Amino acid sequence: MDVSHILDSLNEPQRNAVASPANNLLVLAGAGSGKTRVLVHRIAWLLQAEQASPFSILAVTFTNKAAREMRGRIESLLDQSFNGMWVGTFHGLAHRLLRSHWREAGLVQDFQILDSDDQFRLIKRINRSMQIDEDKWPAKQCQWYINSQKDEGLRAANIEHFDDGYTKTMLDIYRAYEEACNRGGMVDFGEILLRAHELWLHNPQILAHYQKRFRHILVDEFQDTNAIQYAWLRVLAGTDNQLMVVGDDDQSIYGWRGARIENIQQFNIDFPGAEILRLEQNYRSTAIILQAANKLIANNQGRLGKTLWTEDGEGETISLYEAFNEQDEARFIVDRLQDWFGAGNRRSDSAILYRSNAQSRELEDALLRVGMPYRIYGGHRFYERLEIKNALSYLRLLVNRDDDTAVERIINVPTRGIGGRTLELVRSLARSENCSLWQACVRSVNESHLTARAANAVLAFLELIDALDTACDGLQLHEKTEHIIANSGLVQHHEKEGGEKARARIENLEELVTAASNFDDVTIYAENLEQTQAETAAEFEPDSKAFLAAFLDQAALDAGDTQAQESEDAVQLMTLHSAKGLEFELVFMAGMEEGLFPHKMSMNNISGLEEERRLCYVGITRAKKKLYFSHAESRRLHGDVNLCRPSRFIREIPDELVDEIRLKTTISHIPSRPDRNSRGLGRRIGGRIEVPETELSLGQRVAHGKFGEGVILNYEGQGPNARVQVNFDAAGSKWLVLSYAKLQVLA
Ligand code: ATP
Ligand code: MG
């Protein structure tokens, strides 16, 4: 049989890996060196050259998307489909086992899967029934505890509390949670892995069956496996089967979720005599991008170490843009994307990567403004996120109490003791009286339709909204937003949850305040356009209800704007974590600032910082041809403007690889000057040009006849339409039509 085509498109070390006669194999290699490619070709090789049965192959990767791609690539390499082959994620494969062997796994046949939200709610219920103080032992923290134990393969019965108060309480909750799950026939994500592992341990005949079946086990992204995943693999591989793992210690980015780089060393101990192969040629990136990545990661200690080179040319230097603020940053990126797309490239070959989900809003706004399709991976668009919708619902009730959707959403968020039964009563009252939910709430309290406790809870809700409304009266839009977020209990609600996700939610809420302050600006500018008489910006009332309503409309429109279709050519937006394993011609890494990236929660301890640096390495190595870094001198967070320092990661890359772009954006308001030879010229030269010909730039100090002195923050449009946003020392921020504003440039 001719199998040469499987090896043809590989380099020598890759070929050695693919056709290796070794039983166990560790391919340890840097980004873009063809690890995933080797894995795919190895499977094709086993099927074709070694006549392995598809049934004997088990391949594990990190995401369902990667698994689908892997199967597709094998099938197209060999031009046939292989149904018996198991290709999937750890969770997917373990789940499949449990469905087949539910009885032996100690489950009921129709066991249910609890997703993370379900799990959280269950723990909450348990804590309540155990009368555990939610403030002292937030359910989110208990959930985190339980999941980390499961990731380590530990059940409550295996854990010793050594009289430690914290562990004792956590164990009580863990035990009660296990009982509840067993009673209800439910398994959470961690449980799926743990049960699948126990299935091996408790059922030697089942284990023997699968050991006999899966002669070939192959694992991608091995550096991100956790303890229980590794144990499951090790047992399945036993002593006779072939285990191939590929990974990169420099790309381990899930330490916070229990992943253990040590598994790489452990593999060498558990599988003595395993062949260790290194791939050193990178096929993805230009020499400059690769060198930047290598230099950066060299700052981490205790690496396994590797060299990575490319035959590819130097390529373009990395461009670094120091933006004036986050809007300037987004505008810069979108401008570059438009150039790129205009030059005939596909949008989907470009990606904007960022550290925190909250950063996407400014980028989304800029993309929407120019109508460029984009797609966000691994996360909702800003205005569709749960926490944002909740906060907006509070604001909506200030505008209109009869907004039933808003009432439904927040009547018991955060929880205030309004249960399903009460809500059902209110709903049916609204139906029978043909009134809004809000009115039904009022009536049910006044007319004693409810138990005293329920009535109190509903009354508390009504009073809260009224109190918020009163307090917000006369506040500016962003102040209203800030007040609502702080006093609705939403922040505390998420703080109690704890953990990475909750932190992201709070960041998003803070970002909403920023969105609201920017909205002041946008509207004023729109109004300015109508009234070209200008200077009347001060007449607008950002403290009015109409203004709030306009903001809510805008948010609803933004959310309703459906994402680019799967098939549509769209710019890719995602966090650095979701970018793992992917590659793009053009990559932007936005928000390269201390505190944002490295993230402030991780930058103060070595291991946290090193994980951030690996994340940066992952980001850089996604780029094939061109990489941009950007950071902003100031960034508005939580409505406040913060001065930002560039990320240390930028400094860790040698200067000669990076070109600083200093647009120092100048704003030209000179009406698009006709060609000197054109006929228009005479007319213009004949009359006096009203507009002074000074060029302004972001950050410049200026004076205005009415508003006094201030600093230029932002601009929109060119020529006669140019508008600038000035932050006046006394009058605050205003958008002004430049040609009318008669700004005087100060030194
Ligand atoms: P990561 O660490 O980011 O997951 P990786 O090591 O898995 O990267 P691959 O994604 O397999 O790398 O390969 C990177 C790119 O290089 C892919 O586009 C792949 O097709 C290409 N490539 C790998 N090896 C070769 C080769 N020998 N010849 C041509 N192209 C190759
Ligand atoms: Mg890969």
Image (cartoon, rainbow, N blue to C red):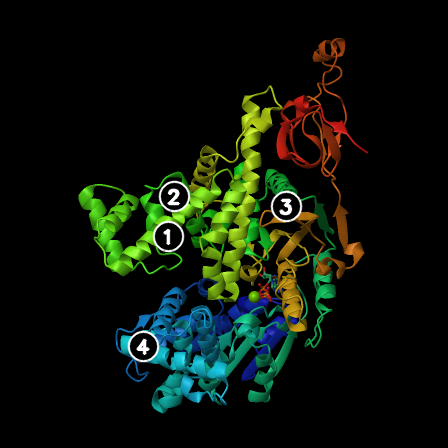
Q: Amino acid at mark 3?
A: Glu
Check mark 1 vs ligand 1: CB closer than 8 Å? yes or no. no
Residue at x-position 45% and y-position 56%? 489
Q: Which residue is mark 4?
A: 180
| Residue 567 position within the rendered picture, expressed as x and y whole percent measured from the top left | 44, 47
Q: Amino acid at mark 2?
A: Leu
Residue at x-position 44% and y-position 49%? 391
Discs 4/3, front: 4
Which of these two is toward me, 453 or 355? 453
SS under mark 3: helix
SS under mark 1: helix
Which of the numbered marks, if any, corresponds to residue 326? 3
Q: Can the viewer see residue 632 in this picture?
A: yes
Residue at x-position 24% and y-position 41%? 435
Q: Can the viewer see residue 1 in this picture?
A: no
Report if the CB atoms under discs 1 and 4 are less than 8 Å apart. Answer: no
Residue 409 shown left or right of residue 545 in the figure: left
Residue at x-position 74% and y-position 64%? 295
Report if the CB atoms under discs 3 and 1 are less than 8 Å apart. Answer: no
Q: Which residue is mark 2?
A: 397
Which of these two is toward me, 215 or 532? 532
Check mark 2 vs ligand 1: CB closer than 8 Å? yes or no. no
Residue 357 shown left or right of residue 609 in the figure: left
Q: Which residue is mark 1?
A: 410
| Residue 447 position within the rendered picture, expressed as x and y whole percent measured from the top left | 21, 49
Quarter that holds the C terminus: top right
- Cα separation, mark 3 vs mark 1, equals 31 Å
